[in-house]
Image: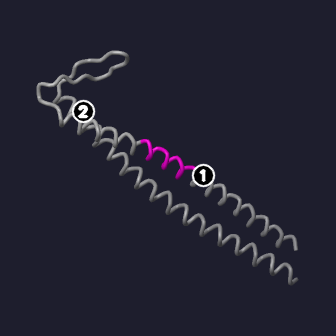
Amino acid sequence: MSSSSTALRELQRDLENKANDLSKLQKDIAKNHQVRKKYTIQLGENELVLKELDLLNEDANVYKLIGPVLVKQDLAEANSNVRKRIEYISAELKRLDASLQDLEEKQYSKREAILKVQQRIQSHQAGKAKA
């Protein structure tokens, strides 16, 4: 009888650990979504800036805000900087997508493991009830 309840306690402890792991994964997924949202907004803003820069004549004055000061900047340099920023943000979004896919796969396998442990606990309790 005691080995039976020890096994049941171990199963319940295992279930608790897996549930905690699943909770951590869900928090990581939520954090990933939050960061992804921020980058998506930045990407849209930078694409808008690029469109505005493309509308300007080559001799137009372009200013960049550095701290509290507007500093004159070359149009080609401004264009280049915005394009580099867009490349960086796009690469970060791809990295976040890959990370999210990995986290979701881990979440799925964790859920499957939890279901198996729950089934083992139920069958263990059902066997105990018959005895």
Residue 79 in the image: above or below residue 40: above
User: Residue 48 vs residue 58: left or right?
Assistant: right
Q: Position of residue 13 (x, y in %)?
A: 74, 61
User: Residue 131 vs residue 49: left or right?
Assistant: right
Q: Residue at x 44, y 42 (%)?
A: 38
Q: Residue at x 75, y 64 (%)?
A: 12
Magenta highlight on residue 36: yes
- Badge 2 is on which residue? 81
Q: Residue at x 71, y 59 (%)?
A: 16
User: Residue 38 vs residue 65: left or right?
Assistant: right
Q: Amino acid at mark 2?
A: Asn
SS class of the residue under badge 1? helix
Tell me which label, 1 or 2, sits earlier in the chain: 1
Magenta highlight on residue 127: no
* Mark sitting on residue 3: none
Over which residues does the magenta segment extend?
A: 27-38
Residue density around tag 2, few if under 14, some if 14–19, many if 20 or more, within 10 Å: few
Alpha-carbon span between mark 1 and mark 2: 37 Å
Q: Amino acid at mark 1?
A: Lys
- Badge 1 is on which residue? 24
Residue 75 in the image: above or below residue 2: above
Furthest residue toward top: 69
Which quadrant would residue 72 be assigned to in this image? Answer: top left
User: Residue 39 vs residue 86: left or right?
Assistant: right
